[in-house]
Amino acid sequence: MNDSLKNKSLIKCSDVNVYYADQQALFNINLDIKEKEVTSLIGPSGCGKSTFLRCINRMNDVIDICKVEGSIKIDNQNIYDPEVDVVELRSRIGMVFQKPNPFPKSVYDNVAYGPKLHGRILHQSDLDSKVQESLERAGLWAEVKDRLQEPGTSLSGGQQQRLCIARAIAIDPSVILMDEPCSALDPIATAKIEELIDELKSKYTITIVTHSMQQAARVSQRTAFFHLGKLIEVGDTEKIFRSPEHEQTEAYVTGRYG
Amino acid sequence: MSNQNFQKRHRAEKRFKAYGLISLVVAASMLAVIIGSMAYKAIPAFNNYTLNLEIDMSNQSTNSTIEDINYRGLLRDSLFSLFPEIEDRSKKRKLSKLISSSSSYNLQDFIIENPSYINKKFYFNVLFTDDSDLFYKGYVDTSLPESERRIDDDEVLWLEYLYSLGRVKNKISSNLFLNGDSREPEVAGFFGATIGSLITIFVTLILSFPVGVFTAIYLENFAVKNRLTDFIEVNINNLAAVPSIIFGLLGLAVFINFFGMPRSVPLVGGLVLSLMTLPTIIITTRSALQSVPPSIREAALAMGASEMQVVFHHLLPAALPGIFTGTIIGLARAFGESAPLLLIGMVAFIVDIPGSISDPATALPVQIYIWADSPERAFVAKTSAATLILIGLLVIINLVAVILRKRYEVKW
Amino acid sequence: MIAASGLLSFKLGKRRARSQLENNEPLRSMPIYHGLYVSLWTILPPIFLLILFLIFKNNILDYLITPFISASTITMGLDEVIYVKNSLMNNISNLNNLIDSDFLSKEMAYSLYGKYSLGRLVIFGSLVILSIIFSFLTFKKLSVRFDARRRVESIFKFIFFLFSTMAVLTTVGIILSLIFETIRFFSHVGFFEFIFGTHWSPQTSIREDQVGSSGSFGAIPLFTGTLLITAVAMSIAAPLGLYSAIFLSQYAKPRTRDWLKPILEILAGIPTVVYGFFAALTVGPFVRSCGEYLGLTVATESALAAGAVMGVMIIPYVSSLSDDVMSAVPVSLRDGSLALGATKAETVKKVIFPAALPGIVSALLLAISRAIGETMIVVMAAGLAANLTANPLSAVTTVTVQIVTLLVGDQEFDSAKTLAAFALGLMLFAITLVLNIFAMIIVRRYRERYE
């Protein structure tokens, strides 16, 4: 990859407003997410960072009372365009949730679920290699290669979360969204996931919501700070943590509140 | 290729959703079909055609008592006087069978109540038989050959002639609502069965409510978790799913044959139904008790209340709406139940309206079964009407439950 | 009377406690508990005794009456003796009726009534004495330090416990009575003849001396008939119920669900006799005329008609529980699948349905159990003749239909005919018990997994 590409924006959000019934959750968010970097979204609880993340693959559609306004463009196409197919959209974007949520199926079937669904792989041998490749990339292959037929739920918490990452990778997404992927994990498992995120950014655009500022500082290149549904500040991670422009940001990153 | 794949999947998605919606619509429309067809078939049950006859009692001999008067003869004479041309005895007999055989009793009752009419001429309304009644209601197809209908050509002529005299009137049938059972469809009503049902349900309520509620309290708050209480729980859950007819067998074997209780009485019916209702009440009471947050219980215990006081001062009042709702639902089920009642003899033909828990009685659902089994065509309408009333009563009972829940439900 | 004595002893106990309170010594329990304690001990023993008497009332009456009958009528048949006994039993509390009755002379009537009155007095007296003794004993126990509250509560607890054994007693009653009668049945008819026999015609025993008067009791056709109708019912209820549940739990908006679900559940609330009437009156003839139109011979009381109506009835049994278990599948699984780009249908089929499968299986088992035990629909809309066939267009009979036909109407209790009904009942109970317990175990495992 050459460096000039690194700064190209993949996702462009302009004037995004989100409402839950009558209550507005996000106010005029304008944020660009750059390709093949890790962008972290930080802010106190209830500031709307998860809501924003779920707008990017339209998971908010699942919630009946949720309404999204504004435009989010991925590769210059507004994903809220009426003719956009949500299913197709999501097949290009992977998502990892707060709590590990492997399906009650075998490890193998968990990873093979996406590729089978989208009919992209026709031969069993291709599927096998796809599963192996995804698990390898998620750093799980060595641990589970002998237990592929065991239920995914039998793995440890950290392994489950890496399984979910492997599951997301298996559909060859361009973007991976992570919603506090380590909040349910112990420090060792967290360290592994963080390592993994660092490796993955060479191939995928990653957006991660996190509660831990240390984590944001460790894994991300850019950081966006949300407060009460507003995007307060966005910039290089180093800058946000060293010399933020806004007082609120400073107060938060230095741990004075939040 | 990829695009096609997505289109195919979206079509599958739409089909899948449509199957779900269709299933729901089919199920819901079956409800409408059942109630609609009952309502349609019940229409003829709600009115009766009556014949206005002139009764001439002016030359009654005064020495005969009221009971001895030949009321049948009076009615027949009056009817025959409208058809002076009929001489033939068998035709006369056929003619007299157009009006209900219950008419002479009605006339007798009328005279007993109003003795002043003796020695007078007056007009009196009598019921037609079920077949003549159905003819007036348009349910007899006169284009069929004579042998295939219940009203033959002579009778058609006579009935039409009576109508042309202006003596035939269409009245709302009070018999249906106020009478007990009868062999004559035009007289039969479901009042006796309804009262029987109410008495039975009352017995059920008295027995199953306290036992059910206290059992639930015991299991929820006092019972130590051990094999015995576990066994009791499994028993309760299983009893909730045991076919109702098994309870009928139990009632027959234990209450009637072993304890020698009489057959056909609401007491035994209520006993059987309360055993059947018990699991429902226990299960709903327990879930109502469970829905009271533990913090309330802990707060009361911390104040030094005993377990028993916690239950009666805090848990029970808070759970009461849920308990009532559950009880009502259980009783509604018992109200519509008929299979166990058949086995304990509440299927007898009973004309009298029951007055106590040990009077022979039948229940409304069983009455429907009895009538549905009767060959007379007019009973179809009666049965449908009784069905509507039964469903109506159940709807009211359930509405009460819903209102109770909505009104008094405590949200935690 | 018992209530009055209870109230009286309650007041006395309470007053005594109060008076001690006035002596400025702290009571351990509130006065009301002292009152309750005394009154419970005053009421409960006589109530217990009274219940015993009521249970054995008929046996006691029988014992009183029997000598009079054997004295007055020896020549009567067994039926008449029973009739006379019953009529005497019903009139025993009324002297005039006894004197008027045709079975007793005046002196005998007086003597019987005398014995009856004496018996009543003995019972009444023993109740009063028992009550007085217990109230006196407990009254003596009351004192300042007496922990009445705890005692009252343990009495209540014990009463509650007794109530909770009702369920067990019912089950025991069912099992014992069924087994007892079934054993008697097998003394008339061979066990294997019943279980493996393919011919069922219990109605032949009109005269004792008739050839083949015992009837034949091969239960196979009844069970195949039951299975056939259940299969028809499930083939309607399973798809409709499951798809309804899927729509309700996955597609319907909460508000739509709030009113659609109760509507569906009304189907389970309609009395079965209504379904039976509907099946016999409307569906049966409709199915037959449809069959005739297609050139098929269809019995009016076809298994198809009864099964179809039963299927409609059990839709909510399938849908309600399935809906619950599918709604209970964690949202995170659904979101995980959707986020991978699965459509809702794919998510349901590949993730939610397999995850909820145990619950759905138990819903189906419970529905089958309900269908097997359903009585009124088949009594009214299915046939009486036992045909061994798998053709849903012909008339078959079921276990429950036979139980009802064998037991409704006049019967003697000892004939193989009536006893057969109990044997069938036992089989029915056993089958549904197994289904219910399986369903319960599966659901319990399922709950443990997700809670």
Image (tube, coloured by chain):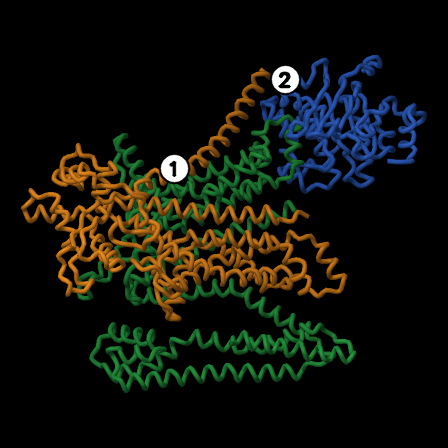
Q: Above or below — where is B57 with respect to C134?
A: above
Q: Amino acid at mark 2?
A: Pro
Residue B45 coordinates in the image, percent (x, y): 31, 44
Q: Badge 1 local density, few (<14 within 10 Å), some, or many (20+)?
A: some
Q: Above or below — where is B216 with respect to C124?
A: above
Kind of element beneath mark 2:
loop
B239 on left or right of A119: left
A11 on left or right of C413: right
Numbered mark located on residue B271 in the image: none
The front one of A14 and B235 is A14
Q: Is residue C178 visible?
A: no
- Residue with the mark numbered 1: B36
Q: Which chain is green?
A: C
Kind of element beneath mark 1:
helix
Chain under numbered label 1: B
State the residue at coordinates (41%, 58%): B246
Q: Nearer the viewer, mark 2 or mark 1?
A: 1
Q: Is residue A156 visible?
A: yes
B261 on left or right of A13: left
Quarter where residue B227 is shown: bottom right
Q: Which chain is orange?
A: B
Residue C411 coordinates in the image, percent (x, y): 28, 63
State the residue at coordinates (29%, 60%): C409
Numbered mark located on residue A82 in the image: 2
Q: Which chain is blue?
A: A
Chain under numbered label 2: A
Residue C346 coordinates in the image, percent (x, y): 57, 29
Residue C311 coordinates in the image, percent (x, y): 41, 41
Q: CA distance from mark 2 to mark 1?
A: 43 Å
